Image (spheres, coloured by chain):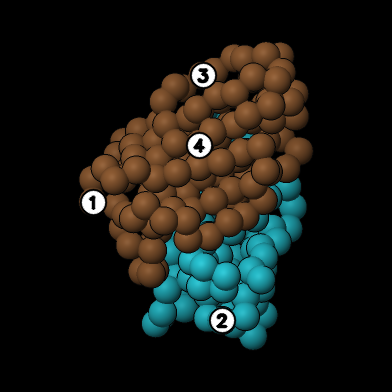
Amino acid sequence: DSGVTQTPKHLITATGQRVTLRCSPRSGDLSVYWYQQSLDQGLQFLIQYYNGEERAKGNILERFSAQQFPDLHSELNLSSLELGDSALYFCASSAVGRQNTEAFFGQGTRLTVV
Amino acid sequence: AQSVTQLGSHVSVSEGALVLLRCNYSSSVPPYLFWYVQYPNQGLQLLLKYTTGATLVKGINGFEAEFKKSETSFHLTKPSAHMSDAAEYFCAVSDWTGGFKTIFGAGTRLFVKA
């Protein structure tokens, strides 16, 4: 158990809909990362938050947004969903953004858009 | 910007044989380098990491990797493969370019034959 909790584990929704994925980082970790893993794109970095502020941005679509709350949990919002958004979404956390520490991954949320 | 290239999306070895998974990176500043493993339906977990100091890094489950700056490589090896090593392996690089973030390679799936 990595200590990172993601909910829900599975999500099935229709095209055009909006969903919210939730992540609780390890206790004390200030950095949260979101990744998308799909068969054709591999593991793609989406966005990083550090102590409530956006710290780095990757290949995140404009239809997607994220935030980190004062209690350090994070949410990834996906809107106007398309079939191609079906993927496994991982959240990871690390102790401090500026340290050379590894990221600890949650089990992921599998999103299926039908 | 950082990037990671993993040579070979699939590698197959016999049980007891040497495992060699290749990773090359690019980074404009000294990088932090990682290898992660992903078992089916699970999140990623850290195998080993290079930060500074000794260039030969030992990790869990008998894996090790050597940082070669001149070759911009961080190949993962294990002297003798075990059936339980069958998984997907990701090389990753972190640095502070454009904000601290970790970029993953496309992954290499390791198959171990009996």
Residue in view at x 55 percent, y 65 percent: B93
Q: Which residue is mark 4?
A: A76
Q: Specify the amino acid type for callout 1.
A: Gly
Q: Check the residue under mark 4 and report the chain it is in.
A: A
- Mark whose residue sits in front, 4 or 2: 4
Looking at the rendered structure, the secondary structure element under dot 3 is strand
Q: Are marks 4 and 1 on the same chain?
A: yes
Q: Check the residue under mark 3 and report the chain it is in.
A: A
Query: Drawn colour of chain B?
Result: cyan
> Which chain does brown denote in the image?
A
Q: Are marks 4 and 3 on the same chain?
A: yes
Per the model, the C-alpha gap separating discs 4 and 1 is 20 Å
Residue in view at x 50 percent, y 36 percent: A76
Picture disc at residue A28? 1
Q: Are marks 4 and 1 in contact (CB under 8 Å)?
A: no
Q: Are marks 1 and 2 in contact (CB under 8 Å)?
A: no
Per the model, the C-alpha gap separating discs 4 and 3 is 14 Å
Q: Specify the amino acid type for callout 3.
A: His
Q: Which residue is mark 3?
A: A10
Residue in view at x 26 percent, y 43 percent: A71
- The spot of residue A105 in percent (x, y) is 42, 43
